[in-house]
Structures are given as C-alpha cells and as structure tokens.
C-alpha cells in the first residue's frame, strides 16, 4: 500500500496561479461582488466568505502506473455555503521537486458536481525527469459554486493532497557482453546486454505489477527500446561503453542502471 497524505495549502501562491485560469473567477471580482450584494450576509454567504471560509473537500491521492488517482469527499447538501449551489470542480497539479518554480497545471476543468474522483491523464506531458522514483506531486481540488439568486459563479476553499512516485525497481543482473555466437559471423560488430526481470510484488490494481518497456541509453541519451524482452543486441564497437538501462512502468521510470562489464581485453 502506498501512503495517503493530506497537506496544508500554499494558499497565497495557489491564489496567484488560479488567477491566471480563465475559468476561475478572480479574487478582485469576488471583492466587487461583496460590495454590491443586495441580500443579507446573515442569509447568503458573501463571495469572499465562499472563497476563503467555505468547507474544503477532503482529498486523498494514490499512485497508479497510468497516473495518480484523486478521490475526495464533499457533501453538497451540508457543506455548500448558504445561498449557493455546488456546480463542479477544478483540479490542479503542482510538482514541488521542480526547483525555483511554482507552476500549477490544470488537470481538469469543470468536472460535474457529482464527481468525487479523477485520474490525472495529463501527466504524460511532464518531463521524464519528473516521472521517476521519489518525485512528489501535489493536487488541489477547487469547488465551484453559483449563487442561487443570480447564478454568479465563485470558487470555494481548496482541498489538497500529496503523493509520491514509489521506488521503482531496476532489473537485476544487468551486464554487457561481446555478442559472440548469438550474432553469428558479424559478432565483432555487435554487443549484447542482458538482465533479469525485476520482482514486482505490487497489487495489480496499481499497474506497477508489470513492466511496460525496457529502454536503453547511451552516454545519457535515449538509444532504443528492448520492448519487454530481457536482452538486447545492438551494433557497437567491441569495447564501447556508456550504455545504461531503465524500466518504464506505465507513465513512470526506474532510475538508470549501469551494467557490469565482464568483457575481457576491454579494461584499462
């Protein structure tokens, strides 16, 4: 089981990010509505009260190979501000481990008011470096309300949760060899890298119970795919070095692993 962690909101910074989203009502607009309210604040919550002091969704997040899955609890009949109707949710993502950046990405806009879960299917656009073991994601669920008297829109107080990519195993017994008889007459122009499949003890519901692909790198750059096989043959000099392997599990990757090198006559 992966840990489920709720986090405190970075409210001032998230507010700044929300102001850039066209579907979210700006705080300045909410302030102007406060001053123009024609109904009693004792009967109907003001837009400012909705924005800052309404009930927050209780959010949790779990990691899956095809993207983190969010679930939240919110009882619209008891938690919606008085005089307002819950009409939907926005979902945003922040990656804390991207240094010197505070960029909130829109994961979903205008989810129906009855929705209480969502899987992040936008994570494929995030760089590979931020889809590896140990990376954390923070998600924000923002309720959207409309005032019953005039259907003016206002976002409510945000709920949040954080989730971490687990330590994804690299394949054991990785080594690089002369190609030898496997490549026949041209064996001197090829190398062979071989490994064992990693032991995966995850629940199948997470998607981490199977390997999606083995990828080969050369001097830090992508070189090719070995599919789900446990060996690869590629054209290279007999003593070429700099080859590594990593494993893809759905959208996520293990760390790079450098093979042992039993090739004779290639060591300094």
Image (spheres, rainbow, N blue to C red):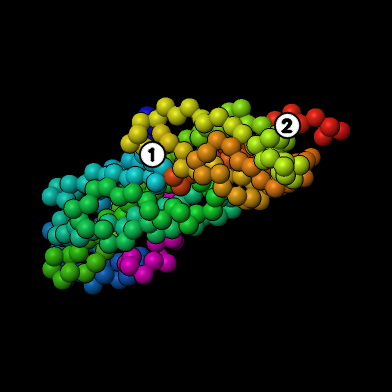
Q: Whole-percent x and y of residue 67?
A: 40, 47
- The residue lying toward the viewer, choosing from 5 and 118, is 118
Q: Is residue 224 visible?
A: yes
Instruction: Compute the Cα span from label 1 to label 2.
Output: 32 Å
**Would you say residue 208 sits in the magenta stretch?**
no
* Magenta-colored span: 8-25
- The residue lying toward the viewer, choosing from 64 and 88, is 64
Q: Is residue 161 left or right of residue 79?
A: right
- Which residue ends up furthest to the right in the rendered image? 268
Tell me which corner region of the image, top left, top right, bottom left or bottom right, holds residue 186: top right
**First along the sequence among labels 1 and 2:** 1
Residue visible at 73% across and 31% down? 261
Mark 1 Cα within 10 Å, few/some/many (few <14, many 20+)? some
Q: Which residue is mark 1?
A: 207
Q: Which residue is mark 2?
A: 261
Instruction: Verify CB contact (< 8 Å) between mark 1 and mark 2.
Output: no
Residue visible at 58% across and 37% down? 231
Q: Is residue 64 left or right of residue 96?
A: left
Q: Whole-percent x and y of residue 255?
A: 58, 38
Q: Whole-percent x and y of residue 104?
A: 45, 57
């Amino acid at each position: 089981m992966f840990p489920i962690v709720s986090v405190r909101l970075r409210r001032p910074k998230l507010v700044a990010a929300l102001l850039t989203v066209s579907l979210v009502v700006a705080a300045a607009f909410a302030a102007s509505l406060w001053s123009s309210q024609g109904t009693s604040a004792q009967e109907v919550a003001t837009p400012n009260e909705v924005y800052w002091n309404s009930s927050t969704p209780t959010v949790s997040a779990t990691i899956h190979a095809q993207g983190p899955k969010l679930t939240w609890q919110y009882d619209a009949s008891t938690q919606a501000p008085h005089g307002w109707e819950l009409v939907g949710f926005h979902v945003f993502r922040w990656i804390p481990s991207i240094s010197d950046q505070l960029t909130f990405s829109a994961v979903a806009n205008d989810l129906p008011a009855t929705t209480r879960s969502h899987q992040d299917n936008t994570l494929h656009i995030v760089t590979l470096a931020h889809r590896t073991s140990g990376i954390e994601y923070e998600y924000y669920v923002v309720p959207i309300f409309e005032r019953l008297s005039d259907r003016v829109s206002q976002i409510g107080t945000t709920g949040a949760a954080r989730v971490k990519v687990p330590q994804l195993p690299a394949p054991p017994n990785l080594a690089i060899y002369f190609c030898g008889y496997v490549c026949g007459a041209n064996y001197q122009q090829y190398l062979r890298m071989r490994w064992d499949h990693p032991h995966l003890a995850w629940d199948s519901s997470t998607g981490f119970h199977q390997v999606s692909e083995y990828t080969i790198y050369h001097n830090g750059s992508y070189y090719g795919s070995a599919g789900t096989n446990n060996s690869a043959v590629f054209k290279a000099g007999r003593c070429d070095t700099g080859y590594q392997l990593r494993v893809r599990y759905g959208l996520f990757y293990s760390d790079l692993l450098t093979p042992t090198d039993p090739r004779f006559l290639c060591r300094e």
